[in-house]
Amino acid sequence: MFEKLDSTDKRILIALQKDCRLSIAELADIAGLSASACHRRVRLLEERRIIDGYTARLDGRRLGYAMEFFVEISLDRQSEDALETFEAAVRRVPEILECHLMTGQFDYLLRIGVVDHADYERIHRDRLSRLPGTVRIQSSLALRAVKPWRGYPIDAG
Protein backbone atom coordinates (compact mmCIF):
# COMPACT_ATOMS: atom_id res chain seq x y z
CA MET A 1 0.00 0.00 0.00
CA PHE A 2 1.42 3.35 -1.08
CA GLU A 3 1.51 5.95 1.70
CA LYS A 4 1.20 9.67 0.95
CA LEU A 5 3.92 11.73 2.59
CA ASP A 6 4.34 15.47 2.83
CA SER A 7 7.72 17.17 2.40
CA THR A 8 8.30 17.31 6.18
CA ASP A 9 7.80 13.55 6.56
CA LYS A 10 10.13 13.02 3.61
CA ARG A 11 12.86 15.19 5.19
CA ILE A 12 12.54 13.15 8.39
CA LEU A 13 12.80 9.84 6.51
CA ILE A 14 15.78 10.98 4.42
CA ALA A 15 17.62 12.08 7.56
CA LEU A 16 16.82 8.87 9.45
CA GLN A 17 17.99 6.70 6.54
CA LYS A 18 21.32 8.50 6.64
CA ASP A 19 21.66 8.35 10.43
CA CYS A 20 19.00 6.77 12.62
CA ARG A 21 20.92 7.84 15.74
CA LEU A 22 19.96 11.50 15.32
CA SER A 23 18.37 12.96 18.40
CA ILE A 24 14.84 14.33 18.14
CA ALA A 25 16.30 17.84 18.52
CA GLU A 26 18.69 17.28 15.58
CA LEU A 27 15.93 15.72 13.50
CA ALA A 28 13.58 18.61 14.34
CA ASP A 29 16.18 21.11 13.08
CA ILE A 30 16.51 19.21 9.80
CA ALA A 31 12.72 18.95 9.38
CA GLY A 32 12.04 22.55 10.43
CA LEU A 33 9.84 21.52 13.37
CA SER A 34 9.76 21.87 17.12
CA ALA A 35 11.07 18.85 19.01
CA SER A 36 7.59 17.86 20.21
CA ALA A 37 6.08 18.14 16.70
CA CYS A 38 8.96 16.13 15.26
CA HIS A 39 8.55 13.45 17.93
CA ARG A 40 4.83 13.17 17.06
CA ARG A 41 5.64 12.85 13.35
CA VAL A 42 8.22 10.13 13.98
CA ARG A 43 5.81 8.23 16.22
CA LEU A 44 3.09 8.43 13.53
CA LEU A 45 5.54 7.20 10.87
CA GLU A 46 6.37 4.28 13.17
CA GLU A 47 2.69 3.51 13.83
CA ARG A 48 2.00 3.52 10.08
CA ARG A 49 4.98 1.11 9.70
CA ILE A 50 6.66 3.46 7.23
CA ILE A 51 9.50 3.34 9.75
CA ASP A 52 9.75 -0.38 10.32
CA GLY A 53 12.57 -0.34 12.87
CA TYR A 54 16.05 0.97 13.50
CA THR A 55 19.26 -0.93 12.86
CA ALA A 56 23.01 -0.47 12.76
CA ARG A 57 24.76 -1.20 9.45
CA LEU A 58 27.58 -3.58 10.29
CA ASP A 59 30.73 -4.18 8.25
CA GLY A 60 30.72 -7.93 7.62
CA ARG A 61 34.40 -7.98 6.67
CA ARG A 62 35.41 -6.47 10.02
CA LEU A 63 33.33 -9.18 11.71
CA GLY A 64 35.17 -11.92 9.84
CA TYR A 65 32.70 -12.47 7.00
CA ALA A 66 35.18 -12.08 4.15
CA MET A 67 32.80 -13.21 1.40
CA GLU A 68 29.20 -12.95 0.35
CA PHE A 69 27.42 -15.39 -1.91
CA PHE A 70 24.17 -14.86 -3.76
CA VAL A 71 22.37 -18.17 -4.12
CA GLU A 72 19.52 -18.98 -6.50
CA ILE A 73 17.25 -21.76 -5.28
CA SER A 74 14.69 -23.64 -7.37
CA LEU A 75 12.03 -25.76 -5.71
CA ASP A 76 10.39 -28.95 -6.93
CA ARG A 77 6.96 -27.29 -6.73
CA GLN A 78 5.54 -23.82 -6.04
CA SER A 79 2.43 -24.69 -4.04
CA GLU A 80 1.58 -22.45 -1.11
CA ASP A 81 2.44 -25.28 1.29
CA ALA A 82 5.84 -25.87 -0.37
CA LEU A 83 6.69 -22.16 -0.24
CA GLU A 84 5.65 -21.84 3.42
CA THR A 85 7.67 -24.92 4.40
CA PHE A 86 10.75 -23.65 2.56
CA GLU A 87 10.46 -20.15 4.04
CA ALA A 88 10.03 -21.47 7.59
CA ALA A 89 13.21 -23.54 7.15
CA VAL A 90 15.12 -20.53 5.79
CA ARG A 91 14.18 -18.46 8.84
CA ARG A 92 15.93 -21.06 11.03
CA VAL A 93 19.28 -20.74 9.18
CA PRO A 94 21.27 -17.89 10.73
CA GLU A 95 23.84 -17.83 7.90
CA ILE A 96 21.14 -16.75 5.44
CA LEU A 97 21.22 -12.95 5.69
CA GLU A 98 18.37 -12.31 3.25
CA CYS A 99 15.87 -14.39 1.30
CA HIS A 100 13.62 -13.11 -1.47
CA LEU A 101 10.85 -14.91 -3.35
CA MET A 102 11.49 -14.17 -7.02
CA THR A 103 9.90 -14.29 -10.43
CA GLY A 104 11.83 -15.73 -13.35
CA GLN A 105 14.04 -18.78 -13.72
CA PHE A 106 14.48 -19.55 -10.01
CA ASP A 107 12.24 -19.31 -6.97
CA TYR A 108 14.38 -17.69 -4.26
CA LEU A 109 17.44 -15.49 -4.05
CA LEU A 110 19.50 -15.76 -0.86
CA ARG A 111 22.39 -13.65 0.40
CA ILE A 112 24.85 -15.47 2.61
CA GLY A 113 27.86 -14.11 4.50
CA VAL A 114 30.77 -16.54 5.01
CA VAL A 115 34.21 -16.57 6.58
CA ASP A 116 35.91 -18.40 3.68
CA HIS A 117 35.35 -20.99 0.95
CA ALA A 118 35.36 -23.85 3.45
CA ASP A 119 32.65 -22.07 5.46
CA TYR A 120 30.51 -21.75 2.33
CA GLU A 121 31.08 -25.41 1.48
CA ARG A 122 29.85 -26.34 4.99
CA ILE A 123 26.76 -24.11 4.67
CA HIS A 124 26.02 -25.48 1.20
CA ARG A 125 26.37 -29.10 2.35
CA ASP A 126 24.74 -28.86 5.78
CA ARG A 127 22.15 -26.11 5.31
CA LEU A 128 21.27 -25.20 1.72
CA SER A 129 21.12 -28.69 0.24
CA ARG A 130 18.83 -29.75 3.09
CA LEU A 131 16.26 -26.99 2.61
CA PRO A 132 12.90 -28.66 1.89
CA GLY A 133 11.89 -28.96 -1.75
CA THR A 134 15.22 -27.74 -3.13
CA VAL A 135 16.07 -29.20 -6.54
CA ARG A 136 18.62 -26.68 -7.84
CA ILE A 137 21.20 -24.45 -6.17
CA GLN A 138 23.20 -21.92 -8.19
CA SER A 139 25.80 -19.93 -6.24
CA SER A 140 27.62 -16.74 -7.22
CA LEU A 141 30.44 -15.13 -5.24
CA ALA A 142 30.10 -11.35 -4.90
CA LEU A 143 33.48 -9.79 -5.68
CA ARG A 144 32.58 -6.40 -4.21
CA ALA A 145 29.59 -4.20 -3.60
CA VAL A 146 29.53 -1.47 -6.22
CA LYS A 147 26.51 0.27 -4.69
CA PRO A 148 25.54 -1.14 -1.31
CA TRP A 149 22.07 -0.60 0.12
CA ARG A 150 21.76 2.85 1.71
CA GLY A 151 18.02 3.40 1.63
CA TYR A 152 15.15 4.25 -0.66
CA PRO A 153 15.40 7.26 -2.99
CA ILE A 154 12.99 9.73 -1.40
CA ASP A 155 12.40 13.03 -3.17
CA ALA A 156 12.04 15.71 -0.48
CA GLY A 157 9.96 17.71 -2.96
Image (cartoon, rainbow, N blue to C red):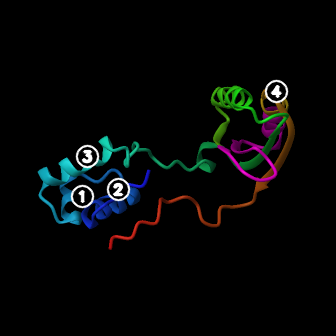
Q: Residues under labels 2 and 3: Cα distance? A: 14 Å
* CA gap, disc 3 and disc 1: 15 Å
Say if mark 3 contacts mark 1, CB within 8 Å: no
| Magenta range | 100-124
What percent of the width, then of the height, locates residue 139? Answer: 82, 48
State the residue at coordinates (74%, 49%).
70
Left or right: where does residue 107 sit relative to residue 76? left
Q: Are dots 1 and 2 in contact, CB under 8 Å? A: yes
Mark toward the start of the polypeptide (1 vs 2)? 2
* Pointer 1 local density, CA inside 10 Å: few below 14, some 14–19, many at least 20: many
Number of the front mark, 3 or 4: 3
* Residue indicated by mark 3: 44
Question: Label 2's element?
Answer: helix
Q: Which residue is mark 2?
A: 16
Element assignment for label 1: helix
CA–CA distance between discs 1 and 4?
47 Å
Q: Residue furthest bottom?
A: 157
Task: Examine the image and state in which quarter residue 107 appears.
Answer: top right
Q: In this view of the protein, which residue sits in the foreground, 64 or 83?
A: 83
Residue that carries the numbered disc 4 in the rendered image: 130
Q: Earlier in the sequence, mark 3 or mark 4?
A: 3
